[in-house]
Image (tube, rainbow, N blue to C red):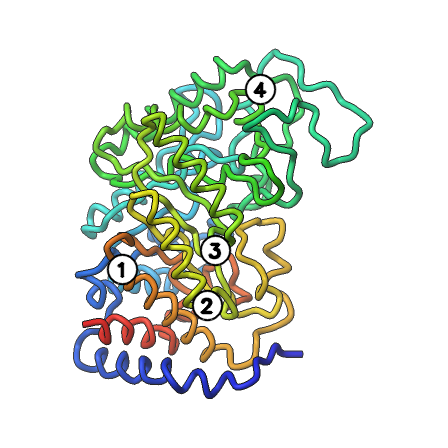
Amino acid sequence: MKTHIPNFNSRFTLLTSALLAIGATARSAGISTLKDAYKDQFYVGVAINRTIAMSTGVRADNVNRTQEQVNKDIALVKEQFNQIAPENDLKWALIHPQEGPDGYNFGPSDAYVNFGVSNNMYIVGHTLVWHAQTPNWVFAGTNPPPRATNASPDAVTTTNAPGTNAPERGSFGRGFGGGFGRGGFGYNGPRASREELLQRMRDHIHTVVGRYKGKIKVWDVVNEAIANGGTNLLRNSLWLQIIGPDFIAKAFEYAHEADPDAILRYNDYGLENPGKRRKLITLIKSLQEQHVPVMAIGSQTHVSVSSPSFEAEDAALTELEQLGLPIHITELDVNSAQGGQRDTGADIANNAATTQGGLVDNANQRLASQYATLFRVFLKHRNSVKVVTFWGVNDGVSWRAGGRPLLFDAKDQPKPALDAVIGAATLQH
């Protein structure tokens, strides 16, 4: 059964059909790329996987593409985008899987950075500190783990003091899967001390950020540290349990030491939700009061064809602007699957459910309409929005492939949404 919205076609005709026509005309007149359409507004970027960065048709990042498909993906990235982010290869589990200074795997990340440099792209690093995709060795030590209790599975064995948070189910973030998704959160063995974990964090950040100093211009320093629900501010992670709430400030401090010229970003999802947005504003204001070098806000913007509305997205960006920082749309996609119409999260545990049930009715039209809506809002806030990054180059490599969430199909062919996005830029001019 397909999802149906009454009178959708009439609403679609009023604005989106006009933007489609404008975009098609612009493309035929030579304004055929996203980076050209928005060159005076903000960077338009894309997350690339290892197959693109290393130009090889191998299975990587849960993507299985032939060499011919990879070649087309690469050509599309070069044609359409002027900024890149790595889907996985700068996450701790991929770049630093083994303990110690000899435990790094720089091959894929070097290929990613070299791809950006050779194609004159604005390069983003994602991510330094995250509760997911972090090897267990990072948290291991000689201190006994918290004493087990007979409490419910959601109870916390540490004191729920200010700045701590009860564990959340299904909150491990989108990512690599296959054993990497949950990272060290499920580690129950002897733990590192606060001092040991801070030293490991500092060494890792100094090594990784220092290696790409001057090449990677923006870093997601801390990713998804805010609690999704309840009253607690921070997610219950091993970073929080072992170090305490100042692990966020310390990560930014170490990144700034490693590259004083890099833009340091806090990144999170679900900021379309007013409650989570309030938590983010509380967190960032607290960090600003402590003179922590947070320099930009990353809003992932994993949304659907049903929401947010123009008014809701406008309100979200308006509230974020009160922080006085640049806003980066970091992981944009628009889910067209029936199962994903009430979800703005980015949890890998929930991802399968968000792509079930087939596509909604009028999927391509609704996708075009929603992308037009979002880019109209981004343009309204162009003084604050500096980067817009799509999470994947096409539907075939998307983490939500079943939801057909991007501007290009699995064969790299443009969908009507591309004309709608280009039309929004052209209409603005």
Is disc 4 placed on a helix, strand or loop? strand
Q: Nearer the viewer, mark 3 or mark 1?
A: 3
Is disc 1 placed on a helix, strand or loop? loop
Q: Give the spatial CA distance, label 4 vs label 2.
A: 45 Å
Q: Is residue 254 above or below residue 16?
A: above
Q: Give the spatial CA distance, label 3 vs label 4.
A: 36 Å
Which badge, 3 or 1, is on the more N-terminal residue? 1
The reply, left or right, for residue 3 in relation to residue 69 is: right
- 10 Å crowding of disc 2: few (<14), some (14-19), many (20+): some
> In the image, which disc is placed on residue 140?
4
Q: Are discs 2 and 3 less than 8 Å apart at CB? A: no
> In the image, which disc is placed on residue 309?
2
Which badge, 4 or 1, is on the more N-terminal residue? 1
Q: Is residue 319 above or below residue 156?
A: below
Q: Amino acid at mark 3?
A: Glu
Q: Are discs 3 and 4 less than 8 Å apart at CB? A: no
Q: Are discs 4 and 1 less than 8 Å apart at CB? A: no
> Front-most of 206 and 260?
260
Q: Amino acid at mark 2?
A: Ser
Q: Nearer the viewer, mark 4 or mark 2?
A: 2
Which badge, 2 or 1, is on the more N-terminal residue? 1
Q: Quadrant of the N terminus?
A: bottom right
Q: Nearer the viewer, mark 3 or mark 4?
A: 3
> In the image, which disc is placed on residue 81?
1
Task: Give how far across and how far down residue 31 sits, in percent.
Answer: 19, 74
Q: Nearer the viewer, mark 2 or mark 1?
A: 2
Q: Amino acid at mark 1?
A: Phe
> In the image, which disc is placed on residue 333?
none
Is disc 3 placed on a helix, strand or loop? loop
> In the image, which disc is placed on residue 272?
3
Which badge, 4 or 2, is on the more N-terminal residue? 4
